[in-house]
Every structure is written in structure tokens, then in C-alpha cells.
Image (spheres, rainbow, N blue to C red):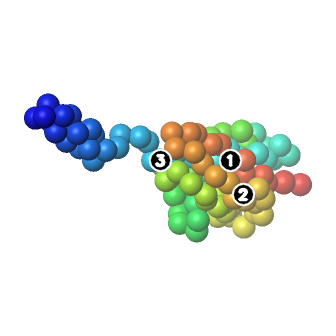
Amino acid sequence: MKTIIAALLLAASAGCAASTAPTSALVRFRLDAPFCSLTTKMPLQFSADGVILGTDSLASGQLSPLYIVTAGTHRLATKALNGWIVTGDTTLVLRADSTYTMAANIYCS
């Protein structure tokens, strides 16, 4: 009888253990400006759900650093700090332990 009770207590306590499953995802931004000079760096601000993740100056094709966000639905956006118009804002669902690269599109003429 003691063995059965001990087994039941062990099984019940197993559900109380802290979860080690990942709860975050990674995002980064890539500047896509094919008609701009390859050496022209654009000052950009990156955000998720209106919260600024960071800023960086990127040339076309370059990647921002990785930023940690919670898994789930997010609206990602890029703002050019020099007045240029950036397109490509998106809303998406990020799975835990995933990495997403968002394109920030700028048209230079």
C-alpha cells in the first residue's frame, strides 16, 4: 500500500516541475534597398508591437542583430530615421525557439 501511495505522489508531483520548454523567439531585420548605393547605410529603428527593439545603420542586404521576443503574435516594423519611407511591416505568429528575418524595403530613386 505504501508503494502505491508513493507512486501516486511521485506521479502527481511530476506535473509541478518547472517547464524548460522555450518561450521566446528571435527576430532580425534585413534592409532590402536594391536601387540604393550598396555602401549607403540607412539609420533604422526596429520594433515589435510598438516597442523599440533597437537601432542600427544598415546597407542594402545587411542584417540587424538578433532580438529576443516572446513567442506568439507580433507586429514587426522598421522606421527609417532619415525620413525615407520603409515598407514591409508585418504581423505574424512566432513559434517558440524560432528565428524570423523581416525584410525592410526602401526604394531609392
Which residue position holds label 3?
Answer: 24
The Cα–Cα distance between marks 1 and 2, rounded to whole angstroms, is: 8 Å
Q: Choose between 18 and 84: the one closer to the eye.
A: 18
The Cα–Cα distance between marks 3 and 1, rounded to whole angstroms, is: 17 Å
Picture coordinates of residue 3, whole percent (x, y): 14, 31
How many residues crowd around disc 2 within 10 Å: few (fewer than 14), some, or many (20 or more)? Answer: few
Which residue position holds label 1?
Answer: 102
Which residue position holds label 2?
Answer: 90
* Mark closest to the chain's N terminus, 1 or 2: 2
The residue positioned farthest toward the right in the image shown: 109
At mark 3, the secondary structure is strand
The residue positioned farthest toward the front in the image shown: 1
Please tell me whether residue 36 is drawn above or below residue 45 in the rendered image.
Answer: above
Closer mark to the observer between disc 1 and disc 2: 2
Residue occupying image coordinates x 68% and y 47%: 102
Q: Is residue 96 left or right of 21 when viewed as pictured?
A: right
Q: Choose between 86 and 70: the one closer to the eye.
A: 70
Instruction: Inspect the image, locate mark 2, and give the three-letter code of the amino acid beneath it.
Output: Thr
Do labels 1 and 2 touch, CB within 8 Å? yes
At mark 1, the secondary structure is strand
